[in-house]
Each structure stands twice: as structure tokens, then as C-alpha cells.
Amino acid sequence: MLLAVTCCTVHIPIQDIRYIEFFPECFKIVFNAIVECSMEIEVFRNDVGGNSNSVLQHVTQALLIDESSASVPVMTSSQPVPSNSKRRSANFAPNIWHDTFQKYADSKFLFLNSIRLSLIDSIQRLSISYHFEDEIDSILVQIHNDFTNKDLTIEERDLHFVALLFRLFRQKGYIISSGIYNKEGEFDEIIVVQDVEGMWSLYEAAQLRFHGEDILEEAHEFTYNKLKSITNQLSPSLADQVNQSLVQSFHKAIPRMKARSYMSFYEESYTHDKVLLKFAKLDFNMLQKWYQKEVGSVTKWWEKLEFSKKVPYARERIAELYFWPFAMNSKPKYTTFRRVVAKVTQWMTIVDDTYDVYGRIEELELLTQAIQRWDISYIASLPECFKAIFNAIVELVDEIIELSAGSGESDFLLQCLKQALSHYAQGYIDEARWCHEGYIPPYDEYKVVASATTTYQALTIMFIALGEFATKETLYWISNNIPLIVLASSLVTRLTNDLDSHKFEQQREHAASAVECCMKQYGFSEEEAHEFIKKDINNYWKDMNEEYLKLIEYIPRPVLDCIVNMARICEFLYANFGDKITDCALCKDHIAPLLLDPVVV
């Protein structure tokens, strides 16, 4: 045995297996393993520009047993191995790990890409991703290409990685199956509960689920309940982030509105990047000044048109309503869009208060005709407030047409806007008639009318126009029939609003809300109606998730984001059954840090 070892070790530097060709197989395995290891080191050194020959020589020299210490002659390949020598055994204990570490064979792929995905996630949560869109796209494309050649499912090691990968891929528009979570399509609660970060990531990923994805439905319910039960066991900063997520997940939130609180959480992490964090703070403060000017310009517009005198019954909520255009797209280059649409959303609130509170049914019929026919003569005999309302929207539409003149689609754009505003006015007069007649429509009928009163179709057309996306194809898509993604976003907004304002609005004469209509159609109690409507809202989110992926190939991403963002801002404005527009005190603590108070750098 000693003779064989000596021959093997002496001839390793020569790297010639012929010297042990008569030896047992185990010696050849050892020899081949050493040669392969040496070659891998050589490749590595070549990759980093080192001297591979000297490294290889160093390794083989280190493996060489000093020839002078061997007391037996060196054997040549022609000498047979003695067969009568007795072999010894130490009776070593067997390996206790079996294939435990085999699953880490792709650790390079997982480790490096996990770092890159986590960085992208942090950049998005810090709301600075608009600076790195090309770089993020390039990384996600590369990871997606790598991923398609891998066979990954959730293991103890990569729950966070797979959940984050799934969320970012779907968010990007890649078609990725929920089967990624387990080959058998089963949700493993034991694995999930052992990993708080992974559980939180899985909860966030489940927000992008489609209809019929039962595994994600189960994951969502489980992670929500489990996270809610353990928040008191987490560090204060992590508990705060998790609680915020349970109220409004990242997928259903506006990143810039979450950025400030995330900065504090990110700063406490030992892995945080100081340069990135400082950049995010400076960017936040810079854009805050930008947003202040935009709100200021809308305030001047309000004062100039003397709305406080002409429509004294209406809510003046310029800062609060700025959340809508801000949410639709907060990037600096869309400042013109935000300035104009901030005026439009204030006009919409005046219209809402006029139809819901102030106007008589006869006056509202005439106002509706004036808007639908684009003719002020229908309201010539009405009080000044109605003329102020009509003149304001005419001026705003004219401004939009003038600002988008470069698109070459001004005539078609004007037609689309008038049609959308007509649809909007029709929704309001239908509800006014219901209120006047004391009619409670079935829930399904109610939703058809209610979706029109959000005016999301008109707002999307305005974004298309002012965001420089005004092509015939895009305008036809949004105006020919209301797309499902717009309808779903509208209904998320209206139904969420109804769940919040139901009791308040029924204290005065008001059209039936979704709650009453649902109770009537299905014979539900008020509590049952609430639960039914919440499920409906979740289903509309699934509609938006699916439609986004279907449309991403031919509708500009910013247009789709703008539509989904309108549902997102509604999730914030009506969270916890509080109307932050009507009760503006609820919004004060959100407006100040976003629009007034700079971040300390």
C-alpha cells in the first residue's frame, strides 16, 4: 500500500496516469481529481489575469511528497501491483450529510443574482429606479435568460430569492409560472415559517397573483396571518415595515410615498450602501421642491378662477388631490402632465360635490347635456357655479390639446376626450336619478355606472396626450371600448371608496352605494356585503395583473403603470376606512413629509 501511495504522489507533478494504470480504481480517482482541481485553478488565474503556470506549479509542488522521505523504489508503469499485500481499514463513520449540500451546486447563480435582485428591490423602494431603468432592465434580462436554463424551486436556502425573483419578473412583464414555488404545486408552510424575510417576500410576491393560482392564494392567506401574528417579535424597524406592508403591500403602493420610511429601515441594515442612501435622500429633496412648485401653480389657478366664491359648497382639496397625478407618474419629466391633471382632479371634485350635494335634478340634467354636447347654452339660465364648472373643463381640454399639438393627433384626441367626459357625466346623472327616485339598483348594474364616475378613461387619455404617447393606435385602444385594465382600476377605486364612505354618505340624501346594492342583489347582511366586495376588489387586482402582462407588448409601459397607479393611490387614500380627501386632517401627516419637510441628509 505504501508503495502504491509513493508511486502516485511522486508522479503527480508529471500528470501521467500511466504510472498507476495497474493500481486499484481509487488511486486513479484521486489522481484525476487532483488534475481537475489544478486545471480549474489555472482557468481561474487566466480569468483574473494571473500567472497560471506558476500557480499550477505551486499546487503540484505542495501536493508532492518529498521523494527523499520515501524508503521504497519508484515504480514504473510496467511493474504490476502486488496482489498479496494486506490492506488496512480505519472503519471511519459514514457521511452524515448525504446530499444536503448538493442543492447548493448552483450557489454562484443564486448568490450573485440574489445580491443583484436585492439591490434592484432597494433601488425601487428608495424610489430612484427611474435613474437606472436601462441598467435594471439589462440585469433582469440577463437573470431571466439564466433562470430559464435553471431548475429552481423553493428550498430552505432561497425562499426570499425565489419570491423576489418572481415579483420582479412579473412586475417587469415576464410570464413566469407560480409553479416556481414547488414542482408538485403544494405550498410548504414548514419551510416558509422558518424564514421571516422569505415569508415577507412571499407575501409581497403573492400580490401579483392571477385568477386560478391557488398556490399563491394559499401563500397570501398564510403569510398575511403569520406575519400579523409575529410582528411583536420583530425588531421595531422591521415590524414597522411589515405592518405597513400588511396594510398596503408594495405592489399596491406608490414607491415614492413609501420611500421616506424605507430610508430609515434601509439605513439600519448593515448591508446598506451609504452612497446609494445619500443619493436617494438628495433625490427625494430635489423632487420635493419640484412638487411644491406644481402644487403652487394649481393653487394660483384656483385663486385666479375664484372657485372659492363661485362654488363655495365644493371641497377645496388641492394638496390632497395632487396625490392622483403624483401617483399616476411622479417622474420629473411628467411635470406638465401633473400640473394640468392636478387641476382636472380638483375640477372632478367640484363636479362630484355638485351632483352629489348641491345641484337639483333639473339643473344636473342640463349640466350633463352641456358637457355631452360641449355647448354652454344648455346652462345659460343656471346659477353661476354651473357655468364656472363648464368653462373650467373647456379651458382645461383646450390646454391639453395645445400642449399635445406636436403629436399630430389633435382632432382625434379632442374627440376622445369629449367622448370620455360625456361618459363621465352620464355616470353622474344616472346616479343622481337613482337618488332622486330612491332607486337601489342591483350590484352588477351599479358597477357599470359607478366605473364611469371615476373618469379614469379621461385621465388616461390625458396622460397619453401629455406624456407624448398620443398615437392613433393607443388612443383607439383607450377610447373605442373601455379596456378591462381601466375598468378594473376604476372599480377598485369606486368599491374601496364605497366601503369607506358608505355610512357617512347615508347620513344624508345620497345615491345607494355598492354596499346597499350588494345587500339588495344577494340578500346579504352589511357585514357579508363588505366581505363580498373585498373579494371583488381582490379579483379586480388579479384582472389588472393579468391584463398588464397581456398588454405590455403593444401598450407603452408608462401608460399601463399610470392606470394601475390610480388604483394604488386609492388603496392609500381609503385605507383603514378613512377618506383622506373628505377628511383632510387624515392626509396632513402624509402631505407634510412628502411635500414640505425635507429628508435630513
Image (cartoon, rainbow, N blue to C red):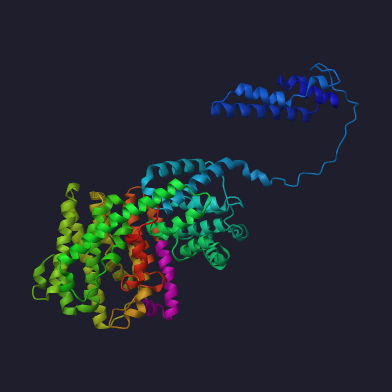
Whether residue 480 can be seen here: no
Q: Position of residue 116 (x, y in %)?
A: 49, 45
Check residue 538 for magenta coloring: yes
Check residue 452 for magenta coloring: no
Query: In the image, 132: left or right of 93?
Result: left
Look at 74% across and 30% down and name the residue there: 30
Task: Using the image as rendered, state which of residue 222 and residue 175 is in the foreground.
Answer: 222
The quarter of the rendered structure image containing the N terminus is top right
Look at 28% across and 80% down and name the residue there: 510
Task: Using the image as rendered, state which of residue 521 and residue 229 is in the foreground.
Answer: 229
Look at 62% across and 44% down and name the residue there: 104
**Magenta residues, start to end:** 515-541
24 to 318, vertically: above or below: above
Q: Position of residue 574 (x, y in %)?
A: 37, 69
Give the quadrant of residue 29.
top right
Query: In the image, 15: left or right of 384?
Result: right
Whether residue 536 can be seen here: yes
409 to 31, vertically: above or below: below
Query: In the image, 528: left or right of 131?
Result: right
Task: Using the image as rendered, state which of residue 412 and residue 94 is in the foreground.
Answer: 94
Give the quadrant of residue 67.
top right
Q: Position of residue 164 (x, y in %)?
A: 50, 52
497 to 60, vertically: above or below: below
Name the residue at the front extreme: 600
Secondary structure mostly taken by the magenta-highlighted segment of the chain: helix
Q: Position of residue 464 (x, y in %)?
A: 26, 53
Total numbered labels: 0
